[in-house]
Image (cartoon, rainbow, N blue to C red):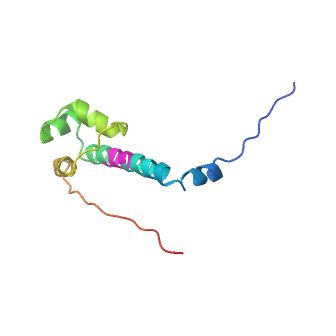
């Protein structure tokens, strides 16, 4: 039996070329930031041993808002006050920072 194999080129070079476009780069970084926020919120909630409903109750919102936030696919970006409330409700504090590339 003959097996047909397709060979694909790696996507890395194409991806890197796309990211040179400032508009594509902006949307990529925005999406990446939302995903990082979603993962951080979920990790904090789990570490605090809270359900989405309990966390929502502590910050005065609904479980569905927490679920949307944790999904990373919400079109809205959570406010800093809301993230600070989540951090406190989970027994932590909110930290914010920037990362810079080193000049070559």
Per the rendered image, the range of residues in magenta is: 34-40
Q: Using the image, determine if residue 98 lies above or below residue 80.
A: below
Report the number of discs. Answer: 0
Give percent across and percent down for residue 71: 35, 37
Give above or below for 99 relative to 59: below
Q: Position of residue 24 (x, y in %)?
A: 49, 49
Residue 99 part of the magenta segment: no
The residue shown at (16%, 51%) is 88
Image quadrant in which you'd find residue 70: top left
Residue at image location 21% in from the left, 51% down from the top: 80
| Outermost residue to the right | 1
Q: Is residue 94 left or right of residue 7?
A: left
Q: Quadrant of the N terminus?
A: top right
- In the foreground, 49 or 18: 18
- What residue is shown at x 24% (from left), y 34% (from top)? 65
Give 5 or 52, whichever is nearer the viewer.
5
């Amino acid at each position: 039996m003959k097996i047909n194999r397709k060979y694909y080129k790696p996507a890395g070079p194409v991806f890197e070329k796309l990211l040179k476009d400032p508009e594509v780069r902006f949307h990529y970084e925005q999406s990446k930031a939302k995903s990082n926020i979603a993962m951080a919120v979920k990790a904090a909630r789990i570490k605090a041993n809270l359900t989405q409903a309990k966390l929502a109750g502590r910050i005065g919102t609904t479980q569905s808002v927490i679920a949307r936030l944790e999904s990373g696919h919400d079109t809205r970006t959570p406010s800093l006050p809301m993230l600070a409330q989540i951090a406190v409700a989970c027994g932590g504090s909110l930290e914010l920072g920037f990362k810079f590339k080193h000049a070559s």
